[in-house]
Amino acid sequence: MTDSPAGEKLQKLLAQVGIGSRREMEKVIAAGRVTVNGKTAKLGDRVFTRDKVTLDGRSVTLNESDTGTRVLIYNKPEGEICSRKDPEGRRTVFERLPRISNGRWIAIGRLDFNTSGLMLFTTDGELANKLMHPSSNIDREYLCRVLGRTDEAMFERLREGVMLDDGVAKFTDIVDGGGEGANHWYYVALLEGRNREVRRLWESQDVQVSRLKRVRFGSVFLPSKLRQGQWEEMNSKEMTELYKMVALDAPVPAKLEPKEVQSLERQQRKNRGIRRSTRSKRGS
């Protein structure tokens, strides 16, 4: 793909790489924090992906705007971190994702090291920022195994709101998930994604979380067939629904490069092989 003859609006390209929303980027430009080819940028500037852009003195690599959008659903295992690199050498969630020739994968939210389950990745920074912004009111659902005594009075406190170190937090819903003895499973939902929020809510009631898995983000559920450490690509219909969640128009899906198609086909074959193996074990 080539640049538009007139270039693209600077705030649009900055939003696409995941720095912030277009409105936030307009404020950053107006504050004089962005330069283009060594000159302070101003609102209304149009740029090309080959231009040298900096934000607060740090270089920003712009993506081509017409390469299309992709979204991945990933089943994160425990023991992976959500940073791109880790000084301690631990595996990151980005290591298993397919490589792309244009742009980069942007994580829509994070899960901590000991939490597994649903994560979404996209090449559209504006979509990522909209989905993560508190004003979007997108609920997240988790399956958690807790250790300790629980009762309805505790559930009522957790629904009404508990004061944590960073403010009031609460579950919007708590549903019994079964279990016996000291360990019990619950499905819980909340509208925020603060650091370790689910664990801290339970801990505020002297209950410990021994297992935690995210199973839903808004209208997107973790596919039952998707094993830990595997990803799958959203189709155009699923992407349209995702964009509707934050009142954005869904763009044209990306056209995959040959190497990316091969990577996707290998992943699909791997998924089918695992499912066949699982069925054969059940039948034996």
Image (cartoon, rainbow, N blue to C red):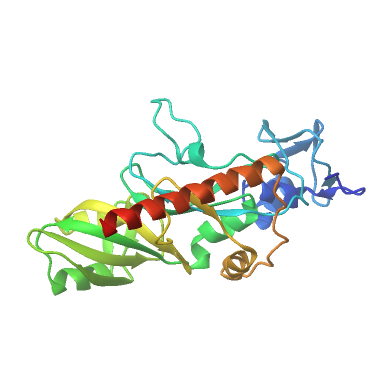
Q: How far from the left and from the top, in percent, is residue 267?
A: 52, 47
- Residue 250 occupies quadrant: bottom right
Is 258 situated above or below 176? Answer: above
Q: Quadrant of residue 58?
A: top right
Residue in view at x 30 percent, y 66 percent: 188
Percent coordinates x, y for residue 233 in the rendering:
57, 55
- Count all numbered tags in the image, as a single digit: 0
Residue 206 to residue 190: above or below: above
Q: Which residue appears at 38% of the width and 25% of the height?
A: 88
User: Could you tell me which quadrant the N terminus lies in?
Assistant: top right
Residue 112 location in percent, x, y?
36, 45
- On screen, 163 above or below 107? below
Q: In the rendered image, is residue 83 in sight? A: yes
Horizontally, residue 71 falls left or right of residue 222, namely: right
Residue visible at 11% across and 58% down? Answer: 148
Q: Position of residue 143 (x, y in %)?
A: 29, 61
**Which residue is outermost to the right?**
5
Whether residue 164 is visible here, answered yes or no, is no
Of 179 and 21, the residue lying toward us: 179
